[in-house]
Image: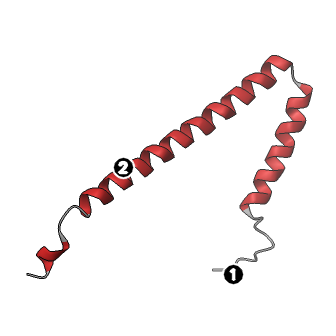
Amino acid sequence: MYPINKREIPATPKIYDILEALAARHLARCSPSVFFKVLATREKNLTTARARKNKHTARMLENTRKDHSIPLLSFFI
């Protein structure tokens, strides 16, 4: 196996920056209806991801409350 040179593999944020720039350049040429459709899709994806994260956080908090409902003194008896 050959060692991987870090210069050969670009960092993930750089790739996303390039893709964002290309997407913005492409959207600047397209019709307004396509532009707003893409914006609506991005907003929907962000909203869905935010809802999924909130649901996960709520479950974690609920599980934490259940775990700590056991009295701690029962472990020392």
Q: In this view, does 7 lie above or below 28?
A: below
Which type of secondary structure does the marked residue at label 1 adopt?
loop
Distance from the alpha carbon under mark 2 to that under mark 1: 42 Å
Which type of secondary structure does the marked residue at label 2 adopt?
helix
Residue farthest to the left, as pictured: 77
Q: Which mark is residue 59?
A: 2
Q: In this view, does 70 lie above or below 2?
A: above
Q: In this view, does 57 lie above or below 33?
A: below
Looking at the image, which residue is at 76% across and 52% down? Answer: 16
Looking at the image, which residue is at 32% across and 59% down? Answer: 64
* Rendered location of residue 45, percent (x, y): 61, 36
Front residue of this view, candidates 20 and 46 = 46
Left or right relative to 73: residue 8: right
Give amino acid for label 2. Arg
* Rendered location of residue 25, percent (x, y): 90, 37
Circle 2 packing at 10 Å, graded few (<14), some (14-19), many (20+), is few
Name the image quarter holding residue 15. bottom right
Residue at label 1?
Answer: 3
* Rendered location of residue 70, percent (x, y): 18, 65
Camera-nearest label, 2 or 1: 2
Looking at the image, which residue is at 17% across and 68% down? Answer: 71
Left or right relative to 40: residue 54: left
